[in-house]
Image (tube, rainbow, N blue to C red):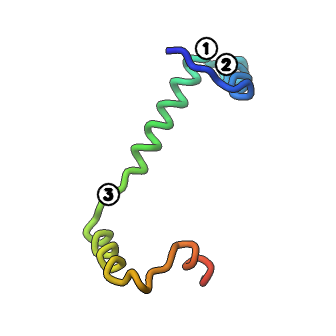
């Protein structure tokens, strides 16, 4: 696989190889993608009974619903 990076990221990868002991740019990209994949797995939503109840409650009261931004401003 070949990828094209913007110059600033290309320079960053080269700097990491020179200063952080990576054997090459492919090792930097592999680590970055592995971390990205792990982070995305951690963001999966698990529907708990409590979350489902709260969603159902919110759907029943859509007329009175507030956005998260509106709720934050009230605090």
Residue, x 50% and y 30% (percent of image)? 33
**Mark number for residue 24?**
1
| Cα distance between the residues tagged 1 and 2 | 6 Å
* Screen quadrant of the C terminus: bottom right
Provide residue 48's location: percent of width, then percent of height.
28, 65
Judge whether 26 appears above or below 71 on screen.
Answer: above
Q: Residue at x 56, y 24 (%)?
A: 29
Occupied quadrant, residue 69: bottom right
Circle 2 Cα neighbour tier, 10 Å, few/some/many (<14 / 14–19 / ≥20): some
Residue placed most toward the observer, 33 or 71: 71
Picture disc at residue 48: none
Name the side, left or right, on which 45 lies relative to 13.
left
Q: What residue did someone put label 3 on? A: 46
Callout 1–callout 2 Cβ contact below 8 Å:
yes
Secondary structure of the residue carrying tag 2 is helix
Displayed quadrant of residue 25: top right
Q: Quadrant of residue 46?
A: bottom left
Numbered circle sitting on residue 17: 2
Q: Secondary structure at mark 3?
A: loop
- Direction from residue 47 to residue 38 in the image, left or right: right
Q: Secondary structure at mark 1?
A: loop
Residue 68, x across and y down, in percent: 52, 72
Q: Residues within 10 Å of mark 1 (few under 14, many from 20)?
A: few
Is residue 44 shown above or below 13? below
């Amino acid at each position: 696989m070949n990828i094209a990076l913007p110059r600033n990221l290309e320079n960053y990868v080269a700097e990491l190889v020179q200063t952080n002991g990576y054997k090459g740019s492919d090792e930097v990209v592999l680590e970055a993608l592995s971390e990205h994949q792990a982070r995305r797995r951690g963001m999966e939503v698990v529907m708990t009974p409590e979350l489902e109840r709260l969603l159902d409650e919110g759907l029943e009261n859509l007329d009175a619903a507030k956005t998260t931004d509106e709720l934050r401003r009230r605090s």
